[in-house]
Amino acid sequence: MSRLSAIDWPKLKAQFGDEALVRHWLQDFLQSSKQDLLLIAQAQQQQCCSKGLLQQLQGLASLLCSTPLNRCVQQLKHSETLEQDLSACVDCYQQVCHEVRRYLAS
């Protein structure tokens, strides 16, 4: 694999401890991911990122064991270039979703 994973899979699996639980939670995550992406898009349009959205993304980054997503959220918290940082967050979030879909398909 030429790119680093957006998810620390061994850590994620250890966190849940049960393969069936991991798969179930990831399916739930994917179902809600469309709403999260809509909220990020809304923040882009409004040029304002709410504390609630930041907390939601921070929680997901922790649960997903995603260092890249965590970095994006930290950048958003101190952003001077909100539009660029939100765009980077969308890209990272979509990469996470792609990896989750690939995992669930295997």
Image (cartoon, helix red, strand yellow):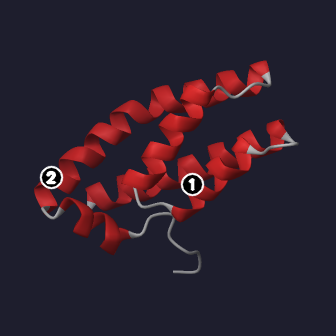
Q: Which residue is mark 1?
A: 69
Indicate the position of residue 38 as horizontal and vertical percent values.
57, 25
Q: Secondary structure at mark 1?
A: helix
* Callout 1 crowding tier (Cα within 10 Å): few <14, some 14–19, many ≥20: many
Disc number at residue 83?
Answer: none
The type of residue carrying mark 1 is: Leu
Indicate the position of residue 69 as horizontal and vertical percent values.
57, 54
In the rendered image of this protein, does residue 60 appear above or below residue 19?
A: above
Indicate the position of residue 70 as horizontal and vertical percent values.
57, 55
Q: Secondary structure at mark 2?
A: helix
The type of residue carrying mark 2 is: Leu
* Callout 2 crowding tier (Cα within 10 Å): few <14, some 14–19, many ≥20: few
Number of numbered callouts drawn: 2
In the rendered image of this protein, does residue 83 appear above or below residue 103?
A: above
Q: Residue furthest right?
A: 80
Q: Nearer the viewer, residue 101 or 12?
A: 12
Q: Nearer the viewer, residue 24 or 78?
A: 78
Disc number at residue 21?
Answer: 2
